[in-house]
Image (cartoon, coloured by chain):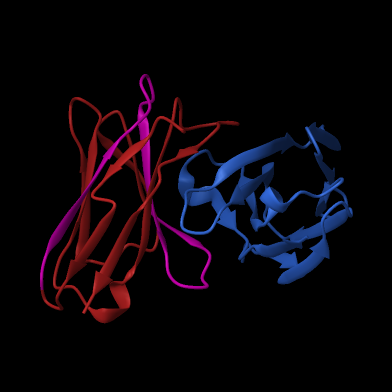
Chain colours: A red, B blue
Amino acid sequence: DSGVTQTPKHLITATGQRVTLRCSPRSGDLSVYWYQQSLDQGLQFLIQYYNGEERAKGNILERFSAQQFPDLHSELNLSSLELGDSALYFCASSETSGGVYEQYFGPGTRLTVT
Amino acid sequence: KNQVEQSPQSLIILEGKNCTLQCNYTVSPFSNLRWYKQDTGRGPVSLTIMTFSENTKSNGRYTATLDADTKQSSLHITASQLSDSASYICVVSARRGGADGLTFGKGTHLIIQP
């Protein structure tokens, strides 16, 4: 158990809908990262927050947005969902953001868009 | 363009045998290289992190090597066990701190057969 929690574990929804994925980082970790992993694809970095502020952006679609709240939990919002958004979404956390830092991954949320 | 190439794509070996997974990268400027183990449907778990000055690092039966001159790394698994069946992901960090500096390989899918 990494100490990172994600809810829900599974989510099935229809095209065009909007969903929110939630992540609670390890105690003491200030940085949260979101990743997407499609079937047979590598991990794709979406976005990173550090202590409430956006720190880095990857290949995140405009239909997707995220935020980190004062209690450091984070939410990833996916809207106007398409079939191709079906994937595993992982959250990770770390103490810091720069230098050599360990990332701890959550168990993931499996999103299925039908 | 920063890239991480892993080989082989997949590998099947018998329980008890050793194996070596390869990672070649073109990330620059280099900061550190990580190996993760990802069980199917679960979040990646860190095995090792190596910086420029480290050329070998062990974690139990896992030994990672790094040649920063040739930009190659390998992960050697000794006396494989059925629980080693997983995807192994090589991640290289560029020296700019944020998660957008991480480049992920597509992974090697390892199957250990009894």
In the rendered structure, the answer to whether residue B43 lies left or right of residue B65 reads left
Q: Position of residue B106 (x, y in %)?
A: 61, 66
Q: Residue at x 57, y 52 (%)?
A: B38
Q: Residue at x 26, y 80 (%)?
A: A83
Q: Residue at x 29, y 28 (%)?
A: A51
Looking at the picture, tell me which residue is in the foreground, B80 or B9. Answer: B80
Looking at the picture, tell me which residue is in the foreground, A92 or A12. Answer: A12
Residue A97 magenta-drawn? Answer: no
Q: Position of residue B69 (x, y in %)?
A: 87, 50
Q: Position of residue A70 (x, y in %)?
A: 18, 26
- Image quadrant holding the C terminus of chain B, namely bottom right
Count of residue discs: 0
Quadrant in which residue A13 is drawn? bottom left
In the rendered structure, the answer to whether residue B91 lies left or right of residue A2 reads right
Q: Residue at x 55, y 41 (%)?
A: B96
In the rendered structure, the answer to whether residue A77 lies left or right of residue A109 reads left
Q: Position of residue A82 (x, y in %)?
A: 22, 78
Looking at the picture, tell me which residue is in the foreground, B93 or B86. Answer: B86
- The relative height of residue A76 versus residue B11 in the rendered view (above or below) is above
- The relative height of residue A110 versus residue B69 in the rendered view (above or below) is below
Q: Residue furthest front?
A: B114
Q: Residue furthest left?
A: A17
In the rendered structure, the answer to whether residue A46 lies left or right of residue A44 reads left
- Image quadrant holding the N terminus of chain B, namely bottom right
Residue A29 magenta-drawn? Answer: yes
Quadrant in which residue B27 is drawn? bottom right
Q: Which residues are magenta?
A: A17-46
